[in-house]
Amino acid sequence: MRAVRSLLWLAVVGGYAVLPWLAPSLTYQLTIVLALGLAALAVSLMLQAGLISFGHALFYAAGAYAAAYLGRLTGAHVVITLLLSSLSAALLALIAGLLIVRYRGIFFAMLNLALSMVAYTLLLKLYNVTGGSDGLVVSATGVAGYAMGPTGLADLLFYLALAAAVLAAWFVRVYLRSPAGWALGAIQDREIRVEYLGVSARRVLLVAYVLSGGLAGLGGAIAGIAVGHVAPDSAYWTTSAGFVVMAVLGGGGDVFGAFAGAALYEMLSVFAAQYLSSSWELLLGVIIFVIVRFAPSGLWGFYDGLWRRMAAGER
Amino acid sequence: MTAIAGPLLSATINGVTYGATLFLVAVGLSLIFGVLRVLNVAHGSFYALGAFTAASAWLLISALGWPPLCIYPALVISALVVGVAVGPVVERGLLRWTFGIEAEAARENAQLLATYAIFLMLEDAQKLIWGGQPYYSGSALRLLGITRINGIPYTNYQLLLILVAVLVLIALRILLRGTKMGKFVLAVAEDPEVSSAMGIPVARIYTVAFTVGAILAALGGALASPTIGVNTGIGSEMIVLSFAVVAIAGLGQIEGAAVAALVIGVGHSIAVFFFPALSSVIPYATMLLVLVFKPYGLFAAAQVRRI
Amino acid sequence: MTAGAAALDVDGLSVYLGGATVVRGISLRVDRGATVGLLGRNGAGKTTTLRAVMGLVPVCAGRVTLLGEEVEGEPAHWRARRGVGYAPEDRRMISALTVEDNLWLPANACGLPHQAAAQRLAWIFEILPELEPLRKRWAASLSGGQQKIVALGRALMAGQELLLLDEPFQGLAPALARRYAEALSQLRERDRQVAILISESNPALLADVAQKTYTIERGEIVTAT
Amino acid sequence: MKMKQSRWIWGLLSLAFLLLPGSAMAQAKPKALHVAIITFFSGSGAVVGGPSVNAAKLTIDQINKAGGIDGVPIKAIYVDESGGPTKNVAEYRQLATKSDVILGYVSSADCLAVAPVAEQLKIPTIFSDCTTDALFEGHHYKWVFRTQPPASANALAMALYILKMHPHLKSIAGLNQDYAFGRDQWTAFSTAMKALDPGVKVGSALFARLFSGSYTSDISRLQSEKPDLVYSSFWGGDLVAFIQQANAQDLFGQTQVALSIGTQGGLQGAKAMPNGVIVGSEHSYLMHPGAIHNRRVKGFINAYKKRFGQYPISTYPYTLRRALIALRDGYDKAIKDNGGKWPSAAQFATALEGLKVRTLMGTMVIRKDHQATYHEMIGLSEHVPQYPFAVFNKIITFPASMIMPPEGTANADAWLRSLKPSLLAEVPAPKVYGH
């Protein structure tokens, strides 16, 4: 059964990898799904500890703006740009995290919100540095010493994003099964017991928060390069809420849930925009509500339950 | 008047009028949190619904050829209509189930997400009802004339807003501490379980408090409508501002919300006068600072909750 | 209300809480005018039983009959209005209100006419004279022992038929505990109809007040004397 | 309104398209010319979207009725611009898969963001409304054109008008929207004022958040400063809100106000506008009472009013119409240059360079640098009995040659700084119309 599931994952990743061949015009959309998925993964990492962040757009925006500046200053290699942008976001998460990991529950949510809104208003107001509400152009960068055409770059970015997503998913999975990951999960309802074991809950959270910031930043950098532009909206609270929704849609249970959530969210926005014109948020709201109300474990819970039932049937 | 004192006075007056609207919305949010312990993300939508309804009321009054002064009672009626129509439906229909979730973290998270879902639904409901076009009912701003203070004209309407906010604050205090229902609300806010054991119908108190909170938000929106362009999106802006106010005051604080709204209003306005580039950062930076040093807000003791 | 029925009849009550069955198939009976003790160690299920009777926790099996009326699924405030008064172990004053307001809350909430409520309050002050000078004080400013007395007074306000007293002597200084017991016996003298269910962990304290005692261990009644 | 089609279905369609051998190579005459028109339908910018789309529909119907472009009808889809530059870039990428030409864009921020993508995807793109000078400064675009004069032209015309009408002006202050356009307008205007009259004191420059809709604090702030003139480049819903709030706070009674594109508040803005405000625009019926005697303008206004039940009083119907006429004329020219065969996108783009377009009220030339030249008009608002909204009087028409930054200007501000006060002498006298 385990082997079947692993094979299935391989098939999913492989299938995703050939999609741009089948439908080249989808490359952009598929890249965005991966970028959003990374941000959703970042949020669902914090959800493991029972913490909802209504401010992760801060790190997403940090990644995208870092990519914009890097592209501007050096015209760096796209891989280096992605790595450095992700690192910048992680560094920001480290600084913010020193403060934020002291808080739980709605205070965690609100402090994240406050930080991201400060960042949002600064991005908006420091016109000479950040371009204000106009934002910045994120210029495409060359590869291995020679410049690539736009379609080449889009394809390259897609495969880089896919590789980043698979790596990140694998890494988070390993992390969650390590003692540090276990402690993170335990913070949700048994924080004191974690402390009894001689583990500092704050340190556990800080590590997770930095990792989470880096992931969101990576997603932001990928999206920034894919779109070719970044604006303060990417740090606004509704962007953060969107990530939370993706994480919850997917279900916090496993890393793939975040990507499934991101894919569903993006598909919903595309299809609803077609059939419901201006009322796609209504549909999204109803879906979120139904999931929170009736299926709190999300898509992943549904999928996992299916497998469990099949496994039980085998026995 | 010296070169600084004149603008300072002006900034303060503007700040207080801005703070007045902010207070109305935030105090509703605070009331809802204090009694139901729900951080209502959809609160900004109530503000927006109040503003849209008031703008429609103005159009209706103009279309019917009624005297323009009718707009002032119409603003208040709009707020009542919105609060009474939306509050109980949202609380009973969409939020009540969350109160049964036992684990605190899971309950808070479910409530954040559920109210966010409601926010999304109400945002699009606005677009479906009122379309994408903005509404301007600025005439109500002019009807009452202006008062010159230190040579600078202020609309009497905005000075009136200050009065309304003060009246709401006093009324809330009297209602909460001086009436049977108010004492029930205080009791439920502090201890819903013991309250129900004393015979207080807690579920009904929840509905009442939520509806009053929604009315206050809608009142903020209705009263602000003549001074702004009523637009989709004003709700998402207002909710974070009122979060900032209640976070600064301490969740569930009522008098505290008034002080925090004043701080943000005057701070914002002084920034407009002296450091315009920073004006919109002020509310969130203040919220951040307060949360860092006093996580439960300026006026709340660590665990005790009151309203 | 059925004439001649017991004030409280619990039959096969089970409560499932936080992943475990806390109370398992309990049956007990409190007759009108009787004082019944529920004896057990901490965590035996006394508090949960009382809360289930009050309607504060969901019942997963069994029946609760108050004054001859089965009350399955009725909320706590409905039960309070039938004349059940509840004094929780940890007192739980409404700290934002004065002592007097705390005492008035059940009367107003249960819809007692003003006249009747005022009479009832005067009656409570007769039984608990130490409350009268405290009326204007903020509930939060009282000592723990004083709050316990206020909690009894508050329970008396609604509890004209049945009083549920959860570990009333817990945490009281000996002198105050004696005073509390004295107040209970005074209440007995003046009102021979009201039924009382007291939970307690110390059998010696129960011996004086209760005519009948159930002993509860790990959620089950083991003896009834 | 069918604004978007499924991107997924389009993906599959384009796949099928790629598999058809050679179909992409030959420039066969298409069944229709697909044009995506982007403007604001929702939010504070929606004040401009309605009239724009009306004018586009009217103009496209007229073109198609007259046989289309060499027999090919124009098929337009209309897309909402609100949502910010990032969203618009994403949307542009989708539109690029199904459009021959993309046209529109009001916000300068959106134009700046979209232009590099247009180059990347090689889609002829005509900006009809945004004005930021930065668009072409230091860029040589192949696929991007603009049929609207830049901010510097409007700012210079405004400065010239103000100094002509108020030669003894001492101090100015500004309130503008906090984004590329508002910043550019204020910089250009204050630079031009300083260049043309070095004695003018430039006071505070306030920048309000785009689409924030509430300006009472900013207005009080300006009132406490008491400048001789307050300049604002607000447009759309922000302009309407500003006029209403400034009215209520008696800003207009206290100081001279100049609104650089004051006609862009549409009907609501024009109704609330008091008398005597200096208002700029390139043209519109509202701006130019004399134009009603022009047969072509009259025809357009009557057709518009008949079909949509209101006057086209803001600038937008005219700017969008102008861009569409440029599109038609550009295709006509490209077909001629191509020996009568349907042109490729690149041939169309080449044809637009140097194109002369006859608009409703004068000639527009698309320069080699892809910027079109056009005149500007400035006047004073005035309420007259015939109309329920303000019209304009004391109009000065500034010819393009006087106010447009010369071709190849790398920095519009440096060019404005180099201007001399002597330029004022060339300004024609205002024309007064009796109503």
Image: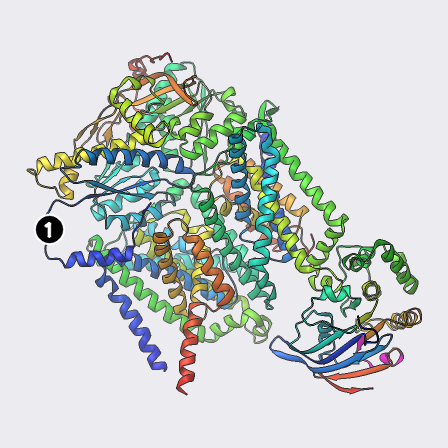
Task: Point out the stretch of residues depicted in magenta.
Answer: C198-208
Q: Across the whole image, how many numbered discs are drawn on residues?
A: 1
Q: Tell me where residue B202 sits by quadrant.
A: bottom right
Residue in view at x 12 percent, y 53 percent: D23
**Residue lying furthest front:** C2
- Taking D180 as reference, is B33 above or below it? below
- Residue B127 located left or right of residue D8: right
Q: Amino acid at mark 1?
A: Met
Query: Where residue B97 sits in the image (x, y, percent)?
Result: 58, 63
Rendering coords of residue D89 (x, y %): 31, 47
The residue to which callout 1 is attached is D25
| D143 shown above or below C191 | above
Q: Is residue D336 left or right of residue A191?
A: left
Q: Quadrant of the C terminus of chain C?
A: bottom right
Question: Visible in this render: residue D410?
Answer: no
Q: Position of residue D415 (x, y in %)?
A: 28, 27
Whether residue A21 appears in this view of the structure is yes
Q: Is residue A202 magenta?
A: no
Front residue of D204/C78: it is C78
Q: Quadrant of residue C167?
A: bottom right
Residue at image coords 57%, 28%? B68
Q: Nearer the viewer, residue C35 or A53?
A: C35
Residue D51 higher or lower than C177, as above or below? above
Q: Is residue C63 left or right of residue A37?
A: right
- Looking at the image, residue D19 sits to the left or right of residue B38; the answer is left
Vertical order, B105 against C32 (above or below) = above
- Disc 1 element: loop
Q: Position of residue B101 (x, y in %)?
A: 59, 67
- Residue in the foreground of this view, choosing between B263 and C178: C178
**Residue D301: quarter of image:** top left
